[in-house]
Amino acid sequence: MKVNSGIISLALGLAVLAGQPVLAQDSFVASAGQAVVKVAQGELQGAIENGIYTYRGVPYAKAERFMAPQPPDSWDGVRLAMNYGEICPIPAMDKVATDEQFNPHRYFPQSEKCQFLNVWSPGINDDAKRPVLVFLHGGGFTNGSSIEGASYEGANMARLGDMVVVTLNHRLNVLGALDLSAFGDSYAASANTGMRDIVAALQWVQSNISAFGGDPENVTIMGQSGGGGKVRFLMGAPDAKDLFDKAIVMSGAGNIAALPREVASAVGEKTIANLGLTPETISKIGEVPYEDLLAAGNLAIKQINESGLATGVNWRPNVDGSFMPADPVSEGWAKYAADKPLMVGNVMDESSTIIRNDNSSLFADNWTKWPDDKTMAKLTELYGDRALPAAEAWKRAYPKEPLSRLAFFTPAQRVSSLKAAEVKAASGSAPVYNYLVTWDSPVLDGIAGTWHVADVPLAMYTVDLVPQAFGGGMDARAMSYDVSRAFINFARSGNPNHAGLPEWPAYTAENGATMLFDNYSTVGLQHDKGLLEILTASTGG
């Protein structure tokens, strides 16, 4: 049966414009005559899902353990691309994540052969030159995947913005950041295989995204949390300089510096010793089961943190002298990406509500219902004799917010976001836009506030995919509609402004402009500067 995808797209577009995203699987078309694209390695058979061309589990590279990624193998005939590919192995979870209620997770089969990406587009083979957005998942450099979040689906954003959305898996933890370069030239690329995978995916986008209706000369990289850190590393990596045009950092502006070479090398050497291997037997590392390899690496990190050589060591990219010649976060990212527009922001409550607390305890002692005396007692616990000045500054900065929310406000992330914006603005070559999400979900009487990862469903227009987190109401949908259009416009032109928001100025050190996303969004101009000064001084931050 022939399906007129143009009529479907029109109907869906009208529904979207009415503020009603279509999420149910009303239509799924896959046939030899439709949704077939040709990439460098061969033909791909995708599907048309509710008018959006969808391709899952597309190989963008191949790689042996600790080796640099290579182009994927070609294939004969047509390869099916309708199901997700394997994700990178991650550490076993010993308990249910405390944020499961508000950040519902999905876990797929794992494999070290995890270099797969997913593509959503309103059209294919049409020379449309749509803007391309590449989303990098969170989980630090240890956990996560392109499908972990139920809200990571790209169809709604592709439909709303007439754009191409890409998500991807890459190597993580010991597989993505173990420096074995001391054991010979064969392992020269080992220190940053995870970041090298992402660069390989961006190279694949450059070579193939035109077939999906995307413009390789208009690519935006967007990441949340650890994904935001990956964006910042890419902004300072010479190999990535010509592979993207704009960047979005969501709750990932903290100073996650690359490991110094001597520290990364020490982790590698101790890992090998923990495995009982030597320079003469290093070749056997390819045969070590992943679980044993991870355990040896995690023990090595613990040993380094206890040795006095360094503190705060974990799995993350390394300064290796080649792929990453210097720490890109502290010195390189603004230089290599000086001409690339940036959007950077975070959410008001970050990790202070559901991620650090049990949902049932929060529900039993709901902070949104605290009386003033209890609120002040809590603030005094946090800020001592600066509790009262902080409370007064809070009321000036956020007059519509309850004072009790100050007990869960995350000043460190806000300060990091502003510092990143200020450094970028100082480059003077491209604009930077700052945001803060202050909207909070009504689910469980508001206990989550605006939690870490909440801005992803808002930006990707997928709040209805996680009703247990956003409540499924019109307020959340309308909020997401305005937030997503800002992200879409930024990806299209480097300017997030649209008619549904107040005028959003580019950030400067003088104006401190921040878009406060809420049911009625407003722009703050240095609105919480005094508050942040009090909070960071009182905590020694």
Image (cartoon, grey):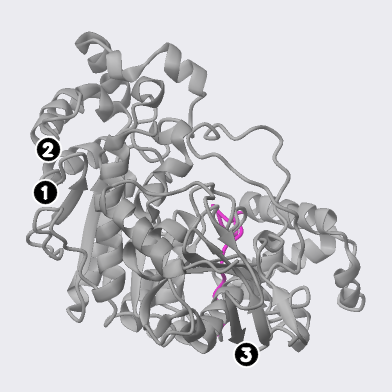
In the image, what residue occupies the spot 48% across and 60% down?
A: 227
Q: Position of residue 424 (x, y in %)?
A: 25, 71
What amino acid is at disc 1?
Gly
Residue 310 in the magenta stretch? The answer is yes
Q: What stretch of residues is rendered in magenta? A: 308-321
For residue 302, above or below residue 379 = below
CA separation in Å, label 2 and label 1: 9 Å
Which one is earlier in the sequence, the residue at label 3 or at label 1? 3
Mark 3 sits on what residue? 40
Which one is earlier in the sequence, the residue at label 2 or at label 3? 3
Mark 2 sits on what residue? 397
Left or right: 59, with 349 as reference point: right
Task: Determine which quarter of the picture holds residue 195.
Answer: bottom right
The image's mark for residue 524 is: 1
Dot 3 and dot 1 residues touching (CB under 8 Å): no
Q: Position of residue 24 (x, y in %)?
A: 50, 46
Q: Mark 2: give few (<14), some (14-19) or many (20+) Cα within 10 Å.
A: some
